[in-house]
Amino acid sequence: MRPSPATASVRVRRAETSDLDDLVTLEDRTFDSDRMTRDQYRRHLDSDSALVLVASANHRRFLGTAVVFFRKGSSVARLYSLASQPESRGKGVGTALVEATEAAARQRRCRTLRLEVRTDNISAMKLYERLGYQRIASLSRYYQDGTDGWRYEKALD
């Protein structure tokens, strides 16, 4: 798959233990609630049922991350978290991470990718809808702070 011009300079790779500080810093910078802890990230880095991806412009410039979960025997993968540095938003980082997540899910023979998003996160909803995700459910008071959410999914061909 060829990178699109918007994502050509963004490199996505599997996260490593050496990325923990950057992962936790971005998590704290991005989310007011429902944050993943250092221990959770550490467990996900070593898990067969999770994949943590990192986007960078070069190996040192940390731009964003995605966390995807896989359930044994299920053809549905779940994009659990997507975050990018504030100064990187709108520059193809989210697109590159979602596309890499979809590729990883296909590799594991998943046919569907699902995710949840806060109803007040307009930019994320626009990204997902632009990438072909369909809103399939309303989630009342889904988030820790009581905010409602939407569930989206995309069939992976």
Image (cartoon, grey):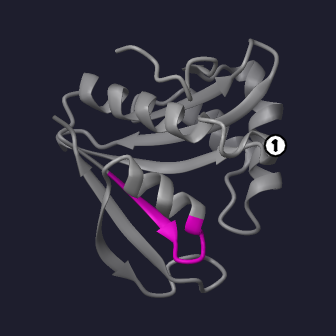
Measuring 82% from the left and 16% from the top, which residue is drawn there?
60
Horizontal side of residue 111 vs 65, given as left or right:
left
Q: Which residue is drawn at 58% across and 83% down?
A: 147
Residue 152 percent across, percent down from the top left: 34, 62
Residue 19 covered by magenta stretch: no
Quadrant location of the C terminus in the rendered image = top left
Q: Which of 36 and 152 is in front in this view?
A: 152
Position of 24 relative to 32 (above/below): above
The percent coordinates of residue 87 (x first, y second) are: 81, 43
Q: Is residue 118 left or right of residue 154?
A: right
**Is 11 located above or below residue 143 in the figure?**
above
Q: Which residue is drawn at 34% across and 15% down?
A: 1
- Residue 115 higher or lower than 113, as above or below: below
Residue 128 in the image, given as x and y percentages of width and height: 43, 54
Q: Is residue 65 left or right of residue 153?
A: right
Does the magenta segment cover residue 120? yes
Within 10 angstroms of label 1, few (less than 14), some, or many (20 or more) residues?
few
Residue 28, quarter of the rendered image: bottom right
Counting the numbered discs, the total is 1
Is 96 situated above or below 38? Answer: above
Tell me the element at label 1.
helix
- Residue 96, percent across and down? 52, 31
Q: Quadrant of residue 124?
A: bottom right
Q: In this view, does 141 lie to the left or right of 40?
A: left
Which amino acid type corresponds to the residue marked 1 in the rendered image?
A: Glu
Residue 63, quarter of picture: top right
Residue 39 vs residue 114, the one in the foreground: 114
Q: Give the range drawn in magenta.
A: 114-122
Q: Name the residue under label 1.
A: 87
